[in-house]
Amino acid sequence: MDLFPDRAHVRLRSRVRGAYLHADEDGVSVSLRARRASLNTAWQVHRVPRDDGFTYVLLHSAAYGRYLARSPGEAPRGHRGNGAYLRLYRTPEQEDVLWVAIRYGDHVRLRHVSYSLLRANGRYRRWLNGVSVDNDAGNQSTMTHWRVEAIPPRAQPPALPLPTPGSNGYHLCGSEHFVPLQQHPEELRRIIVYVQVDDLVNYDPLARRTFWFHGRSVSNLRNSLANHLNEDSVDNITACVRAGSRGRLTPLVVDLPRNQVPMFIIVLTTGSPGEKICSFFSTLFTTCYLYLFIKCSVQQLFLFLHLLSVSVQVFSSEIVLGSALVICLCSVQHLFLFSSALELRHPNVDA
């Protein structure tokens, strides 16, 4: 539906509680929080058509990349139905991450594929701030109503959190290099699996490398990755997380979750065509339309109309027009880069 264009960023605000659906720092739980200007309340839309005729709405956290899902277990005491949590998106057949948005006036209800409803809790017991999935599909409670707030993209990535002092050591395994392990004040440590990809996000599975990482600092993680990849500057790389083999890329710009679960990191080269192409769009003018219909083929026009349906609700008219000219000038390979650039946009949570 129009409130959930593919690859757009949104917030979901409870109609009753006035708080936002929030990806918690443990990287698994979700809750209601009032912190509007937080990346943890931003969600990116991933639309998936299925053979049953529905196009489902999937929501993955702009902070951690994982997908909003219905838990197989019951919600905590005091909450209705099953739990809601964040998980990986691994297979095309996976159903726990599938939602259908049903408009209800100025609000929506998110109906799970199991015909249960995403709901807030704590109408009267305000200390209950959990989010659950109500199994009563006929429930008309306004606790299942959510207001969708669109988040505009920002021109530049947000500033990273300051590095955690004294937690920048690491131990590398699965590679030719070894860096002595230092002592760290934080007990959290996890295995980082990383791979550097080309401009089309292709990579050799045998090129994966691993190392132990201590702490949660995303700045320290980027420094470690740059060291392993023999990059002269950390600014040369962009680190993304992919939550499962079917998950989309999410740029890492917040500190890592408070857990010790291994993470798979995709490393892109900063300034590659996939990154530059979005900034290129914003400089184009309305003459693109004329050029489009003079120069493009029927196949290119079809591709333009497809991209238009994706981008017109997300970007300014200049960017949409820019995509027309790119189709005229570039190959299908470059169109893939445009799709990747949409995936790597940063939401402007301060807007």
Image (cartoon, grey):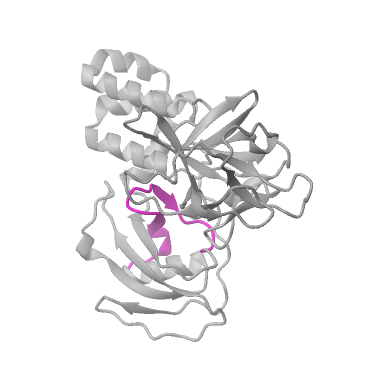
**Rendered-image quadrant of the C terminus:** top right
Q: Is residue 147 magenta?
A: no
Residue at image point 34% right, 24% down: 306
Residue at image point 37% right, 48% down: 247
Nearer to me, 279 or 205: 205
In the image, 33: left or right of 90?
right
Residue at image point 42% right, 59% down: 235
Nearer to me, 24 or 124: 124
Q: Which residues, given as a range, are shown in magenta?
A: 230-256
Q: In the figure, 161 relative to 68: above or below?
A: below
Q: Quadrant of residue 238?
A: bottom left
Q: Is residue 284 visible?
A: no
Expressed as whole percent of the image width and height from the top left, the position of residue 268 reads 34, 54
Expressed as whole percent of the image width and height from the top left, the position of residue 113 reads 45, 38
Q: In the figure, 134 relative to 243: above or below?
A: above
Nearer to me, 316 or 112: 112
Q: Is residue 127 visible?
A: yes
Q: In the figure, 74 relative to 210: above or below?
A: above
Expressed as whole percent of the image width and height from the top left, the position of residue 257 reads 52, 63
In the image, 273: left or right of 170?
left
Expressed as whole percent of the image width and height from the top left, the position of residue 88 reads 41, 54
In the image, 282: left or right of 90?
right
Residue at image point 27% right, 36% down: 334
